[in-house]
Every structure is written in structure tokens, then in C-alpha cells.
Amino acid sequence: MAFTVRNLGKLTKNFKKNLILPSRLANSQSYEQLINSMPETRVTTLSNGMRVATEDYGFPTCTVGIWIDAGSRFETEKTNGTAHFLEHMAFKGTKRRTQTDLELEVENMGAHLNAYTSREQTVYYAKAFSKDLPKAVDILSDILQNSTLGESEIERERGVILREMQEVETNLQEVVFDHLHATAFQGTPLGRTILGPTENIKSITAKDLRDYINTHYKPSRMVLAAAGGVDHDELVKLAEQHFGSLRADTNTQVQGLEPCRFTGSEIRVRDDDMRLAHVAISVEGTSWSDADTIPLMVASTMLGSWDRSMGSGGNTGSRLAQDSAKFNLCHSFQAFNTCYADTGLWGVYFVTDRLKIDDFMISLHEEWMRLCTSVTEAEVNRAKNLLRTNILLQLDGSTPICEEIGRQLLVYNRRLPLAELEERIDAVNANVIRKVAMKYIYDQCPAISGVGPVEQLPDYNRTRGRMWLARF
């Protein structure tokens, strides 16, 4: 379908240049030409070590944010929950702006201000009109460097976080994955939750928050990233103006990053009053930078995802989905591949009836063993095409692009070009999948977490015995 763009008005020449019409994409650009014509990622490092990265797509809007190499993994058992608590406090007022002033300024700009915390990163970002980029950077700088952390706001936010914890407990997928981390990485920082335990939330003080900032919020561990309609040189000047005074401290770049060992084990939280069982099973995966990460991504895509609302279950390329639809094995399942700095989790999460748990586990193990021994080129090619599509769909808009820039600079120390990613995906074949599956799946000890009516969840030794072909 073709369409015509009229009255571009004051949109930049760059926007006209990079605007990809469907007709142009279909008629004159191949997939290879498209990924090779993506805007350049420009990166500048300030004198204090902070990196500034942009991709200019010429849009009338932009997303700009601060990506910080600090999350719940950098906490101790006593301070677990501090990073997430600090994220909440960022919007409660600064020395220059009250909470009301901050909210009104953002809304008057028509902008969106948000933040999130993961196990290894903390992110603060804003989406605004391109002309308001200086205001957005000023606000981000203010909340990062000048938050008041007032006692009354801290006390009020305790209640907010405790209510958030109650809400998370109703999201059984989140609960299952927290349990999975707790058993897979037991005794290590990755085994702790992002929100932290209740007793920590009730005892965190302003000093704890300031200590976390002083220890981890260092320019060498920060990336100021922007995508959309952004001028790189302008953003560098803004970064010098607002973040140039931050004191460089390269010695803290890896502070708190303790090795996290994987332990084959399980956690069961049995509740027979629940209607459905929620289960996750995983082997140890790879870090972001591991050479096997891309093949494992392809293997995960081969398993795919499915739920009963999908009308195509029996006709998908995923054999696990076909079996689930044909034999009513589950209500839904999804494969996952979670990467961290030095390890990862690769597995499947599924929701099923209490009497179907073992049936699904048998089918899943059969698929895992097939990945190790007899996967075909046709299946691998299908998964590679689907993975390419998923990657491009995730870059639809300035916000996900900005997230990719910030995250990749932290985990890879560079922006991974789509052309390079395509080459690495294209290099995967059936033989590579079999070798990687044998390395990470075959005869390995899995980590398992189950919540709900999980009486039929097989004994761990039985599950472990199914991790090689002779013991079904």
C-alpha cells in the first residue's frame, strides 16, 4: 500500500531523507539495503567518562534518557531494594523544582517522563518534541543530581512501594520468575528481587539512598542516549552543560559486580486453591557478549510461544505449539532467553491445568532433546526469519531505539549495528543449533520454579534424568 506525504512544513530535511514509505520499501529497498541504510550511531565520550550517543531519524519527536550501570545486583542483602526505591524518589522534587512544578512542566511540554529498574541497570528517560530536547535534558539532570530525598516523601513512598509489592504478588508470571532467580542464583545478588524484601523497604533511609548514588551514579557508568529528531552536537553541548561537573571515578565501574553462580535446583510454592499451575524451567544461559547468545536466541525462537487465544496453534512452525494445541497440554507457554553481564537463563514458562503438568514437561523435554540431535535446516531458517522480524518490530519508534542504544553501550560498550547482527543470525545453521543445545541443555541441571497446584510437577531427579535421551 502506497501513500503520499503532503505539507511536510517545517520537518527537517533529514526527516524527508529518512522517511521510508511502504512503496519505497517494497519496490526499491531489499531487507539488506534497509539494514545497511540505518542512521549512523554517533558516540562522544565526555572528559569525565560519560558517553553521549544518538541516532538521528529526523522525527518531530525524540526520546532521551540516562542509562546507568547500576541495579539490584549491585546491592547487598541489607540494602536490597535501594535502587528501585531511589527510582521512585526521583520524581518527588528537587532543589529547583517541587513535585508539582516537575509534573506541570512535563505536562505543559506534552512530554512523558518515566523510569525503571532492572537487576543490572537503572534508567530515567523522557519522550518529547525534538524542539524541547534541552528542557528534557535539564529535567533529567535535575532529578538525577538534585533530588531532595526529603523524609516526608520517603515515608510516603514506602507505602507506595509496599502496595506495588502487593500488586506484583498478583502477577504470577513475575512471582514465578522471581522464584526462578532465587533458586537458580541462590546465595548471589541475582537471586534477590528488584523491589527488595518488606523489612528493607520499611527501614531504608535517606542516607542509604545517598550512599547508593555516591557509589554507583558515576559518569563512567552512565550513557546519555537519544533517538528520533536529535542533533548529536547539540546533545553533547547539553551533556557538558548539565553533566560535565560530575566527578569522574573510573574505579567504581565494576564495583559490586560479584560473580553469580548458577545452581540446578527448584522452588515449589504449592497452593491447591489456585486454578492453574504456573511453572518455569531453565538451564544456565549466556551473557550478553557470549558468542553463543545469538544461536540460543534462534533456538528460543524455534520453541516460540503460544496460548489458547491463538487460532493457529496447530499450524505454526513450533512443534511445541503444535503439540500444545493438539493435545491440550497447556493454556499458554513462552520461551525466554534472559542475559546478564556474566550469565543468563534460557528456558520456558508455561501455565497449565494441574493434571497436565507432566504431559507438557514430557513434550518440552522431547523438543529440547530434538534441538540437541535432529533439528532441521528448514526449522532453523524459519526461526531466523521470525527473529529478524521480532528485532525490527522492537525498534518501532524512538523509545525502543533509544533503549537499545543505552543498553547496548552498557553491555557491549558499543552500538551493535543491525548489519552485524544480521550476519551473526545468518551464520546460524542446524549444526550450530545442535552444538549449542548439546552444550547448554543436554545432561545439564535445570532450575525450576512452580506456583499453584503443582503436586504433579515431576520430582526434580526425574526431571534431571530427562535431560538426556536414555532416561525418558
Image (cartoon, rainbow, N blue to C red):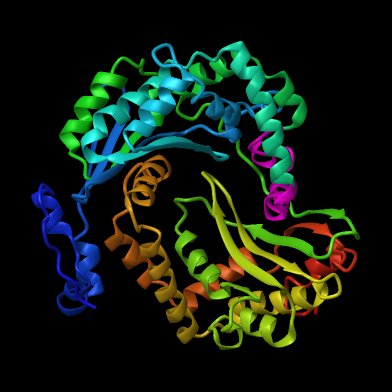
Q: What residue lies at 22% left-to-right and 32% top-to-bottom?
A: 235
**Residue 81 placed where, x, y %?**
65, 30
**Residue 216 placed where, x, y %?**
49, 24
**Main secondary structure found in the magenta portion:** helix
Of residues 412 and 37, which is closer to you in this image?
Answer: 37
User: Is residue 110 part of the magenta span, yes or no?
Assistant: no
Of residues 152 and 385, which is closer to you in this image?
Answer: 152
Task: Please give left or right for residue 120 compared with residue 47 in the image.
Answer: right
User: Is residue 183 part of the magenta span, yes or no?
Assistant: yes
Q: What residue lies at 56% left-to-right and 72% top-to-bottom?
A: 304
Q: Magenta part of the protein: which range?
A: 170-196
Residue 194 visible within the image: yes
Of residues 233 and 433, which is closer to you in this image?
Answer: 233
Q: Quadrant of residue 450?
A: bottom right
Quadrant position of the N terminus in the picture: bottom left
Q: What residue lies at 66% left-to-right and 30% top-to-bottom?
A: 160
Q: How many marks?
A: 0
Task: Please give left or right for residue 306 compared with residue 470 in the image.
Answer: left
